[in-house]
Every structure is written in C-alpha cells, then in structure tokens.
Image: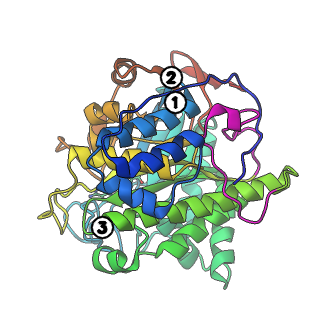
Amino acid sequence: MTTVALPSTDLVSISVETAVSDPRIEQIVHKVKAGQRLSVADGELLYETPDIWTVCSLADLVRRRMHKNIAYYNINRHINYSNVCALSCSFCSFYRKKDQDGAYELSIDKIRNEAISAAKAGATELHIVGGLHPYLPFEYYTQMMQVIREEAPKLHIKAFTAVEIVHLARISKRGKQKYQGIKAVLRDLKDAGLGSLPGGGAEVFDDRVHDEAFKGKIRAGTWLDVHRAAHELGLNTNATMLYGHIEQRADRIRHMDILRKEQDRALNNWARTQNIIMQEDDAVVLTGPDEMYPSNRLPDPSDFDSGYFQTIIPLPFIPDDSAIEHLPGPTGLENLRTLAISRLMLDNLPHCKAFWIMHTIELAQVMLQCGADDIDGTVVWYDITKVKSTSTHQEANVWDLQRAIRQAGFTPVERDTLYRPIERDGDTWQVVENK
Ligand code: V47
C-alpha cells in the first residue's frame, strides 16, 4: 500500500471513538483507524451488521480526515438536451421514442441561450447529458460545446456519460479500433470545450443485472474504457452506482471494488509522471490518519495533468414511472448505509457526493454526517428523475444549500467542477488557487 506525497496544507489530527455493538466489525474499525484498505468481505460485512451507526461514524471519521469541517456545493445548471433514446432501460423514466408524446430535442440556439442565462446567473458549471438520439449528427454535439465556449467561456462543461461517448464514437465513425475511436471522440469534444465527464450510466457493474435491467447498454468494461481514455487525455471524471433495484448488496461491493482498482491505475499513472516510485497498480489510500501523509492527501486538480475519478455518487433507484416501478426503491437507512460504505470502500476517491435531487435535501444533509462532503448544486431544471416533484423545475437556491450544510455542522464552501474553492461577489466569481 502506498501513501502519496501531495502539496501541503495544514493537517488537523482527528480522533473519533466509536462504541461498537457488533464484535464482528471490530477488525474493520481497527483497519479504518489505521488507514488500511477494506476487503470485499469487509464491505459485505458492513452491509450485514446491525450496527449501522458504527458504519456511519467510520465514514464520518474518514470524511473529516479528508475534508475537515468543509462541505461543498456548487452553482450549476443541468441541461438534458434530448430524451429520445435508442435504449429502453427498465429503471429509466426519462427516455422516449422518437415519435412518442413528450419526446424532445433542444436546438443549438436553445442551448446557446441556456448557457448565456446560466453565465449571467453566476453558474460555474453546465452538466449536460441526454439519451442516445438515433438521428442527431456528431456535429450537433461538437457545435453544442463550441457555442457554449463562445458565449460563456468561463463555464465548465461537464457532459456526456460513457454510453453517450460510445454512441458518438459509433455515429462519427471515428477510428476502427474501439478504444481509439472513443479517445478520438473525446479529443474532438475536448478541443470543442468539454471539461470533464459526469459519472452517470455506470449503473451496477454486473452482467446479470445488466442483462435484466439495462440490456443493450455498454457493459462495465466499456464504461471503464471511456473513463480511462478520458483520464489519459487529462479529463477528470466522476463515478456513480445506481442501486436499490434488482441488484444484490454484494453486487454493489463488487462495483466499488472495480472502481477502486481503476482509480488505483489512474493515480499510479499520475504518480509515474511525477517520478514518484510505485509498484505496478499499487493501492493508493487517501482516507488514512493524518500521520500517513507527509503532506496533503488529496490530489490538487491544478497540478494534475492526467485525470482521475473525483467523486463517487451513489444514486438510489427512484421507481416512479419506470418499467420496474412496482419495486419499492431503497429505504432511508439503506441509502445512508450505502453512502457510508461507498466512502469507506472507495478509499482512493477524494470526494463522496450526496446528490440532493435524488435523496432530498433533508437526507443529503444527514449524509454529510455519514461520509458525504458534497451535496451538488443549484441544478434548476432536471428531467432524469423526480422525487417529491412533478415538474422538471427542481431548484435549490444557494441559501438552501448553505443552510443545510451549516445545520449539519459544516462550513459551506462553493466549489467549481474540479473541487477548487470559488470566491464570489454576486454573479462574478473566480477560482481560489492553492486552497
Ligand atoms: O446515468 C436513471 C441514473 C444517472 C434513474 O457526475 C437513475 O456530478 C435513479 O449520473 N433512479 C444520471 N437513478 C445522474 C448522474 C449524476 C447526477 C448528479 C451528478 C453527477 C456528476 C452525475 O441517473 C443516469 C442513471 O445512472 N438514473 N434513472 C432512476 N430511476
């Protein structure tokens, strides 16, 4: 196992005592306190134990080691450019077929106007995703990047899940080799203005679940290929896990383990560019006690020229209007536990996000005390899922987000997409370098 020397900041030593009511997890408590990587069997035990509060306290311990008393939010806008999709995933209530009622695609002019109004409102990020549209040409996507770049050069564009990138590689006929085609598309989009990839579309990395719930969608290997290609091009990406439908808890732990291995590879690649000597695919743990780190444990995005996974975002299945809406979806405690276990297992991802749109602000606030350090942003329009809302207008104002964070006992810090703190005066903002 390797600890990584990164640029220094002040470190505070934190000690948390937990009263463990289940002797089976004492060994796990010891490992987390010592900064040792948890095994797949440990992850499964964290799901089995009735002592959920120890699980949450451990996640809170490592979250505080990494982020102290800070919790992040951002000022962003989501754009869902089209709901027309060649796939018919059973968990998804967003997609429509081309001539179906409610099918839409946004014009480039509409997207241009959205970018202008987002920039005027002081947003720092556009999060753009959509269905796999059978007819829109590749130029639609590059043009989308270009007009946003022209009209709002400061806005970070986080766009296109891995399955959309594979779709674009197909329709643009870029390169005969799959990996090279994916990379060529990412390069084109990056040149046109793409800044990073969101974490969507990972679902659960398991072939049985894949074939039952989202057959036709890319499998785990291809999802990882897209993110690896993005990392090689210096783009940071996020990672999700969609849980609480037809998968088993053990499938979730395997999903986390696969992501963790891919992140080891990304961080090791980066270390080699810095002449830090590491063994091939050595585990990089960022969640240990402060003494393990000679300087800051977290990657500094301004220093990284190769990309990595920034954040894990566990997404609870929202049944409403999907083909499997007869399933109940996960309970509140299952959501808390899954978020806490994600924080503990994914010891090499710097951040853990409780996406308030899917959890509600109320539960996202509780999650800040169980491993999350980020609740995402102002959002405004969101079409993919709806909790407690019948409209796609799902907006939190900055005051709502800050209040939720403060009342959870943390200091709210506005971040950009790359987790750099933002200094703001009304709608004018800038990144604070060297946090
Ligand atoms: O790709 C679809 C999932 C994802 C449902 O990267 C569903 O910062 C729950 O990825 N219930 C889109 N989930 C959301 C997403 C995301 C959100 C916020 C921030 C970031 C980021 C990424 O939502 C889809 C799919 O995996 N999804 N349907 C559903 N019924």
Q: Which mark is residue 64?
A: 1
Q: Which residue is tagged 3?
A: 248
Mark positioned earlier in the residue sequence (2 or 1): 1
Q: Amino acid at mark 1?
A: Arg
Instruction: State the quadrant of the N terminus.
Output: bottom right
Labels 1 & 3 near each other (Cβ < 8 A): no
Q: How many circles with numbers are drawn on the protein?
A: 3
Residue type for callout 3: Gln
Q: Residue furthest top?
A: 425
Residue 415 visible somewhere in the drawing:
no
Q: Left or right: where does residue 120 sit relative to residue 156?
A: left
Gap in angstroms between the C-alphas marked 1 and 3: 29 Å
In the rendered image, residue 411, in percent from the top left (x then y), is placed at 48, 19
Instruction: Measure how far apart labels 2 and 3 are at the Cα level.
Output: 34 Å
How far apart are the alpha carbons under marks 2 and 1?
A: 6 Å
Quadrant position of ligand 1: bottom left
User: Is disc 1 placed on a helix, strand or loop?
Assistant: helix
Q: Position of residue 222 (x, y in %)?
A: 54, 74
Q: Left or right: 181 with respect to 90?
A: right
Q: Position of residue 115 (x, y in %)?
A: 50, 40
Callouts 2 and 1 close, C-beta under 8 Å: yes
Residue underneath mark 2:
69
Element class at badge 2:
loop
In terms of sequence position, does the residue under pointer 2 or pointer 3 come before the other?
Answer: 2
Residue at the farthest bottom position: 176
Magenta region: 278-305
